[in-house]
Image: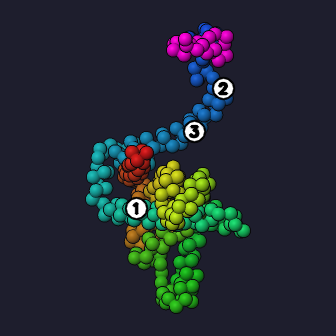
Amino acid sequence: MSAVVPRSGSGLAVAPGDPPRPLPAGRRRRPVTSRVPPVVWLLLLVPLAVEMFWVFWPALNSFQLSFTKWSGVGAAVPVGLKNYRTLLADPIFHTAIKNNVLWVIGFGGFSVVTGLALALALNRPRRGVAVYRSAIYLPMVFSLAVTGLFWRVLYQPDGPINTVLGAIGINTGEHQWLADPRTALGAILIAAIWRQGGYIMVLYLAGLKGCDPSLEEAAAVDGASWWQRFRHIVMPQLHNVNTVVFAVTVIDSLRTFDIVWAMTRGGPYNSTQLLSTYMYQVGFTVVNLGYGSAIAVVIFVLAIAFIITYLVRATRED
């Protein structure tokens, strides 16, 4: 004899094997769209409309312009794939691509390592830790242009960097760091990492707060070393944070413009030219908006390719 279970919210009795009975006509569930208050739809649709107008429409327009030749005045002249064929033979574009690869590796790698190391060092509550966190995050308050101008002063031949190096016995001969093609890109990279490290630190601090400390304590009792606990217990729990950090770092690497433009404007001799600075130079200095739009499309494709590849790998691992 099967047990009879009363249906929740009604006086009807239903046996475990019986199919569910339909709700009365007056009590059927309403569609999701009718259950959401109109004010919520308003708050969602207004930002979406603004995003479509200020972001998606210019992006689509830029893609269309990449197949034209246009100086910003008059009608755009269709040229087909000519802009992209010109890019393949453009030596400055090749330099910008190479510098962007170095920038993604250097800026992304060192920023993540620096931010993660700082987060691990400042994760434990101790006296003065909030002051250190605030001081390290402080550079993020300033814009990239201000950061670039600040470091440009530091890199002057008679500036603090050469003075400090001379004080510790390293004679630089008042080296002009930003005027030397061999050191200019590395000098800008140091300034960018100095600013980005605090931001990555905050992201990892948030992730570390969500880690289960009991797992690490149990591993320590079993004799696991610090590195083993970090690699096999902490890092797997930071998987979601790593995804966010990777996406943010790649996007920031490919759209880096302000700090390079403020410090060197892509010089000397195009040695610090990135795709973003070259796009701006071609589009708004030379005023060849069609060619500049083609470079913008390349930046977009590279960013999407990096992010989708990483997300596919992360999904497969899950």
Q: Please tell me which residue is depicted at 32% across the width and 43% down the height of the picture.
A: 78
Disc 3 residue type (three-letter): Val
Disc 1 residue type (three-letter): Asn
Residue 243: x percent and y percent?
Answer: 48, 51
SS state under label 1: helix
Disc 2 residue type (three-letter): Pro
Instruction: State which mark lies toward you, 3 or 1.
Output: 1
Q: Residue furthest front?
A: 1
**How crowded is the residue under tag 2: few (<14 C-alpha within 10 Å), some, or many (20+)?**
few
Q: Image quadrant of residue 266?
A: bottom left
In this orientation, which residue lies closer to the viewer: 313 or 11?
Answer: 11
Any mark on residue 258, and which?
none
Q: Image quadrant of residue 1?
A: top right
Residue 164: x percent and y percent?
Answer: 57, 85
The residue that mark 3 highlights is 50
Residue 18: x percent and y percent?
Answer: 52, 12
In this orientation, which residue lies closer to the viewer: 122 or 249?
Answer: 122
Q: Please tell me which residue is depicted at 60% across the width and 8% down the height of the picture.
A: 25
Which mark sits nearer the N-terminus, 2 or 3? 2
Residue 265 left/right relative to 151: left
The residue that mark 2 highlights is 37
How far apart are the alpha carbons under marks 1 and 2?
Answer: 46 Å
On whether residue 4 falls in the magenta region, the answer is: yes
Q: Please tell me which residue is depicted at 48% across the width and 40% down the height of the picture.
A: 56
The residue stretch that appears in magenta = 1-20
Instruction: State which mark lies toward you, 2 or 3.
Output: 2
Any mark on residue 100, and which?
1
Instruction: State which mark lies toward you, 1 or 2.
Output: 2
